[in-house]
Amino acid sequence: MPNMTLSLPEDTYRIVKNHKEIRWSEIARRAIEDYAKKIALMNEITAQSELTEDDSMAIDKKIKSGVQQRYTSDAASITGSESE
């Protein structure tokens, strides 16, 4: 199995160093493996897609706009303000 070297922030390193009973390499290996599997699945799904990057950006903009409207409306109802 190939090896990898990781850099950690000092505060994280201190915690890791103080808990030698934990197999940190196993935790890191599993986290990287899980994330890599998710990326591989996304690559597999998107390889079959006919959407262009412009299409996906347009969908992204519509979704974000809808989410913003929803939360603006919710905030207005909570605060009693009806200005939208």
Image (spheres, rainbow, N blue to C red):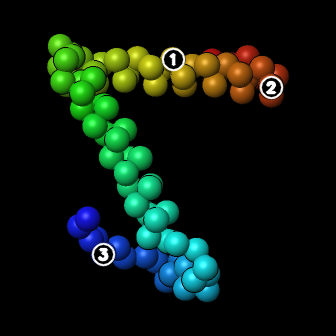
Instruction: Give the labeled residue for mark 1.
Output: 66
Mark 1, other Cα within 10 Å: few <14 / some 14–19 / many ≥20: few
Left or right, 37 with reference to 79: left
Q: Which of the two labelled residues, at mark 3 and mark 2, occupies the earlier sequence position?
A: 3
Q: Which of the two labelled residues, at mark 1 and mark 2, occupies the earlier sequence position?
A: 1
Marks 1 and 2 sit apart, C-alpha to C-alpha, by: 18 Å
Which numbered disc, 1 or 2, marks the residue closer to the eye?
1
Which numbered disc, 3 or 1, marks the residue closer to the eye?
3
Left or right, 56 with reference to 28: left
State the SS at label 1: helix
Which of the two residues, 82 or 73, is positioned nearer the viewer here?
A: 73
Residue 5 badge: 3
Q: Residue 20: where, in percent of width, then height?
A: 57, 83
- Residue visible at 50% across and 71% down in the picture: 24
Q: Residue 43: where, in percent of width, then height?
A: 24, 32
- Residue visible at 18% across and 24% down in the picture: 47
Residue 23 badge: none
Can you see residue 11?
A: no
- Contact (CB < 8 A) between labels 3 and 2? no
Which of the two residues, 69 or 27, is positioned nearer the viewer here?
A: 27
**Height in image: 14 above or below 58?**
below
Instruction: Give the labeled residue for mark 2.
Output: 78
Residue 18, quarter of the rendered image: bottom right
